[in-house]
Image (cartoon, rainbow, N blue to C red):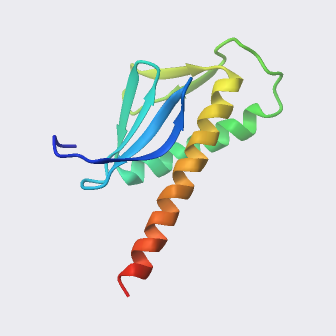
Amino acid sequence: MNTNCTYQTLSFDDGFGYIVMCERCRCIQLGLGCAQFHFDELDFRKFCTTVGEIYKESASQVSSDRATILLSSSFPSISLHLTIPEVEILHWMIEEADTTLTTNSLISLFSQH
């Protein structure tokens, strides 16, 4: 990521966070509360898959306001502790971001021809 980044919003939830992508360097930023996570597009897709799997596993659990779900990061000492409702919101945001990325890729593909 550089100082010349221009961001496109991929997903936004006023009470939870945001996902944006730089249109120049294609870096993706996830902001949750006071934490920011940066991904390249491949790592973001892997993160999406992981959150999707956790979301499916947590669907059968009783909803709780306790942070019972651990989501590891690429740094061993940093992880997210989320409640089931937070995982649901994160999953929704990631699905929306993924849809926007896929749509942008298709538009770009067709505009080249």
Q: Give the quarter of the figure containing the N terminus.
A: top left
Given residues 49 and 1, the one toward you in this image is: 1
Residue 109 locus on image (x, y percent): 41, 77
Horizontal relation, residue 98 to residue 36: left or right? right
Residue 96 locus on image (x, y percent): 58, 49
Horizontal relation, residue 57 to residue 29: left or right? right
Given residues 70 and 2, the one toward you in this image is: 2
Horizontal relation, residue 88 to residue 33: left or right? right
Please report the residue visible at 60 percent of the width from the left and 48 percent of the height from the top: 95
Residue 49 visible from this viewpoint: no
Please report the residue visible at 66 percent of the width from the left and 42 percent of the height from the top: 53
Q: Give the quarter of the figure containing the C terminus.
A: bottom left
Q: Is residue 70 above or below residue 60?
A: above
Q: Is residue 44 above or below residue 18?
A: below
Residue 65 locus on image (x, y percent): 71, 13
Tell me which corner region of the image, top left, top right, bottom left or bottom right, holds residue 38. top left
Please report the residue visible at 44 percent of the width from the left and 81 percent of the height from the top: 110
Given residues 50 and 111, the one toward you in this image is: 111
- Of all residues, the one furthest to the left in this rendering is 3
- Of all residues, the one furthest to the front in this rendering is 14
Tell me which corner region of the image, top left, top right, bottom left or bottom right, holds residue 86. top right
Residue 8 locus on image (x, y percent): 38, 49
Total numbered badges shown on the rendered structure: 0
Q: Is residue 106 above or below residue 84?
A: below
- Of all residues, the one furthest to the bottom in this rendering is 113
Q: Is residue 86 above or below residue 52?
A: above
Residue 3 visible from this viewpoint: yes
Please report the residue visible at 51 percent of the width from the left and 63 percent of the height from the top: 102
